[in-house]
Image (cartoon, grey):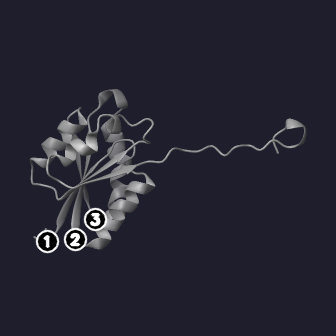
Amino acid sequence: MDAASRRILVVANRTASTPLLLEAVRKRALEGSCTFALLIPNEPRKGATDWTFETAIPTLERAAGGPVEGIVGAEDPFEAVRAALQGPGFDEVIISTLPRRVSEWLRRDLPHRVEKLGVPVTTITQEEEREIPVMPGPMGRAA
């Protein structure tokens, strides 16, 4: 890796291969030389991290145009990020969260807490899935 290459830590779990995150990775890869690592906090009550790695790493690698390192972190997302930042160093952290209404990471203020560690943070919050209302037709039946 050359000296000008940026290292970007992507923190995600169930959102690790969503279109919004993939677009952010693709954009950074096009901006210049960079490498990516996907950090998934090891939250046993939420399901196996290896399943997420199996599905997310290949799609992230396509978006990044190169290999993506997989890191399993501590159960607490903040501690997982803090430990990862103590290693070889990252120039940016991208935190991908569930929609605001259901995101535990946003409720725990994870993005702001990570910023206090001295690294730029980008937060990508998934949008709520919206149901398309069914317009009633004549006689109150769906059209």
Residue at 34 percent across and 57 percent down: it is: 60
Compare residues 121 and 23 and report the one nearer the observer: 121
Question: Relative to 48, is 133 above or below?
Answer: below
Asked if disc 2 and disc 1 are in contact, CB closer than 8 Å, the reply is yes
Name the mark on residue 66.
Answer: 3
Label 2: which secondary element: loop
Crowd around label 1: few <14 · some 14–19 · many ≥20 (10 Å): few
Label 3: which secondary element: loop
Q: CA distance from mark 1 to mark 3?
A: 16 Å
Crowd around label 2: few <14 · some 14–19 · many ≥20 (10 Å): some
Per the image, the residue denoted by label 1 is 4
Per the image, the residue denoted by label 2 is 33
Quarter where residue 30 is shown: bottom left
Asked if disc 2 and disc 3 are in contact, CB closer than 8 Å, the reply is no
User: Is residue 23 toward the left or the right of residue 44 in the image?
Assistant: right
Dot in front, 1 or 3: 1
Crowd around label 3: few <14 · some 14–19 · many ≥20 (10 Å): some
Residue type for callout 3 = Gly
**Tally of marks:** 3
Residue type for callout 2 = Ser
Quadrant containing the N terminus is bottom left
Residue 86 coordinates in the image, percent (x, y): 9, 47
Label 1: which secondary element: loop
Name the mark on residue 37.
Answer: none
Q: Is residue 92 visible?
A: yes
Residue at 24 percent across and 58 percent down: it is: 36
Compare residues 15 and 127 and report the one nearer the observer: 127
Residue 92 coordinates in the image, percent (x, y): 21, 57
